[in-house]
Image (cartoon, helix red, strand yellow):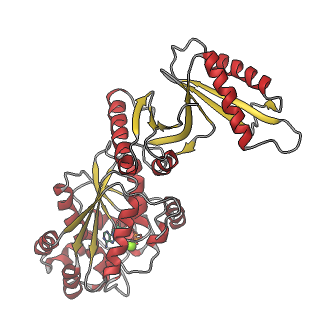
Amino acid sequence: MTQPCLIVRFSETTLKGRNRAMFERRMVQNIGAHLQSHGDYRLHRQFARLTVNGGGDLSLALDILKGLPGIANLSLAHPVPRDIDALSLAAVAYLGRVLEQSPRTGTDPIAFKMEVARKDKTYPLNSMEVASRLGRDVLAAYPQLKVDLDHPRLVVHVEILGDTAMLFERKVPGPGGLAVGSSGKAVCLLSGGIDSPVAAHIMMTRGVRVVYLNFHSYPFIGEQSKEKVRDLVRFLARFQPASRLYFAPFAATQTAIRDRCPEGLRTLLYRRMMNRVANQVVRRERAGALITGEAVGQVASQTLPNLHTIAETAEWPVLQPLIGQSKQEIIERARRIGTYPISIQPYPDCCTLFQPRRPETRAKPDALRRAEVGLPVDALVAECLEGLEWTDYGPEYYPADWSA
Ligand code: ATP
Ligand code: MG
């Protein structure tokens, strides 16, 4: 039998025309970038899917790609001739090996189903005809099988493509969504908490390439807090081909706010200053939006009036993909993505610095503007921008059970 290959199926098949072509091109580029340093894989595109051949470990490729936005599902498959007689022989041989690996226990017949998808509609037989021919030949070869279309224990999938057919047992689900980069770029305000990494991940699965921006208050807050943010970005770098992390020094701004503004407004003033700096990073990166991990009602700064006073300082759309989710839902999502164990490491975020004893929960934009009169806003923003440091991360990969 020929060498196995990996079939990668793209999602969002409702996309049409040029959008679809663009999405698929981006998908292939991303897959290539993620596999590049792991082996000499060859990629071949047909029928809204990609086959990945040889030159490297295919289980590793599957493990790397199963998290990639835009992938609907993947299968480790065997290419076989698609001519019906040769296909039937191959299916019988394939099933023989499958049965060898998981033999029958007891004397009950094994419930079995042949699932045929004819992707190339010019193939002379339709899916039903292929299924019944292969089913008949397979049953003749293995009397321990019985066909059960509703509750099969064993499913053999057959896909008929342009020049070959594929046999496989499983479809491993991917995250779906769109290929990163097919919906432009946005700057994510990444705190190191639980929420913002999840927000970044959701937007990546909507095809947005994410640039990260963290505000840190070194030396009030230690190097470990920065390392935690780096860990998060390194982890999230498995989902897009290129990730940039900016650190903006925020100690001077926070000190000025502490010294010159009403205590109850501090957190809101911090967030407003972050937005002003982020506005410029969006320009610098030629991005089109901000992303935050805000959710209504989660903390004092996230009441509707407070969200309004924060958003007022953003010059770009603020994407808040978690806005209607509960903390529990967000935590579950962080666990599934894999960021949770990093996020809960107990290093402080700058928002906890000089925290007000009684934060204002219903601040009016006027009150904030008044509070900012005594603040050298432009100079502080300029200082943050001058102090920006950044690092680029390639498509990193950690094994599935990796945790910080
Ligand atoms: P998170 O879990 O993301 O920290 P949170 O529920 O703790 O969110 P806040 O601390 O009020 O809420 O932060 C709200 C949002 O503001 C964050 O999700 C993030 O997008 C942004 N943010 C807060 N602190 C920082 C920071 N130090 N650097 C960059 N962005 C930040
Ligand atoms: Mg936070």
Spot the residue most to the right.
Answer: 107
> Residue 223, relative to residue 205: is it above or below?
below
Number of marks in picture: 0
Residue 352, position as x, y percentages in the image = 35, 81
Q: Is residue 191 left or right of residue 298?
A: left
Residue 196, position as x, y percentages in the image = 39, 64
> Residue 92, relative to residue 257: is it above or below?
above
Q: Is residue 21 left or right of residue 154?
A: left
Spot the residue most to the front.
Answer: 1
Residue 77, position as x, y percentages in the image = 56, 36
At x 55% / y 39%, what residue is drawn? 75
User: Which quadrant does the N terminus fall into?
Assistant: top right
At x 74% / y 21%, what residue is drawn? 137
Q: Nearer the viewer, residue 194 or 135?
A: 135
The image quarter containing residue 16 is top left
Q: Nearer the viewer, residue 232 or 187?
A: 232
The image quarter containing residue 378 is bottom left
Spot the residue most to the top.
Answer: 124
Residue 253, position as x, y percentages in the image = 20, 79
At x 39% / y 69%, what residue is drawn? 302
Res 384 seen here: yes
Q: Is residue 181 left or right of residue 276?
A: right
Ligand 1 resides in the quarter of the picture at bottom left
Res 12 seen here: no
> Residue 287, relative to residue 22: is it above or below?
below
At x 48% / y 21%, what residue is drawn? 163
Q: Nearer the viewer, residue 177 or 364?
A: 177
The image quarter containing residue 362 is bottom left
